[in-house]
Image: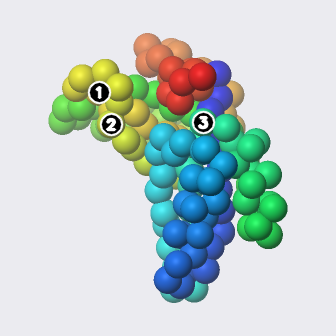
Amino acid sequence: MNVTQLSVFLENKPGRLQNILRILYENNINITALTISETQEYGVLRMIVNDPDKAQQALKGDNITSRMTDVLAIEIDDKPGSLFKVIEAFSKRGMNIEYMYAFPGKNEHKCVMIFRFENIEAAKNILATEGYTIVKKIDLIGE
């Protein structure tokens, strides 16, 4: 049920992101979602892609280091308060969210939230208790 996220550290210089995207394009890797966080000297590119193993190998072939991480994806209503309710469920149980990001869902009026937790199994239990459905990899990125 987990979704695999590919993370790449990249120098905060012109052309670095373009190079990574070129490699993925040339290897027919589709990016479903991405986020970039940055500091002055480097950034972390986090992506949900259709084939993380193939993407990692393609990047490695160009001497680009990447890491795969399990994350959770849930679909929530695209309306005020929806994200608050999810965060509240974790907060009242003392569950720390390492990071998160969102993108539009395939269903109208929905969005998909990607969450990273230290204890992913505990997060799954909280989501199940609160009635949230974890988005399966196949539903997120297709075949």
Mark 1 or 3: in front is 3
N-terminal-most mark, 1 or 3? 3
Q: Quadrant of the C terminus?
A: top right
**Dot 2: what SS?**
strand
Could you say which quadrant of the image residue 5 lies in? top right
Rounded to the nearest angstrom, the CA distance separating label 2 from label 1 is: 7 Å
Crowdedness near tag 2: few (<14), some (14–19) or many (≥20) residues, C-alpha within 10 Å: some
Name the residue carrying label 1: 110
**Dot 1: what SS?**
strand
At label 3, the amino acid type is Asn
Identified at 59% across, 69% down, the residue is: 19
Rounded to the nearest angstrom, the CA distance separating label 3 from label 2 is: 17 Å
N-terminal-most mark, 3 or 2? 3
Q: Which dot marks residue 124?
A: none
Q: Position of residue 90 (x, y in %)?
A: 48, 35
Tag 2–tag 1 contact (CB < 8 Å): yes
Identified at 65% across, 29% down, the residue is: 2
Crowdedness near tag 1: few (<14), some (14–19) or many (≥20) residues, C-alpha within 10 Å: some
Name the residue carrying label 3: 50
- Up-down: is 109 above or below 128? below
Spot the residue most to the left.
Answer: 80
**Dot 3: what SS?**
loop
Name the residue carrying label 2: 104
N-terminal-most mark, 2 or 1? 2
At label 1, the amino acid type is Lys
At label 2, the amino acid type is Pro
Residue 126 visible? The answer is no
Spot the residue most to the front.
Answer: 26
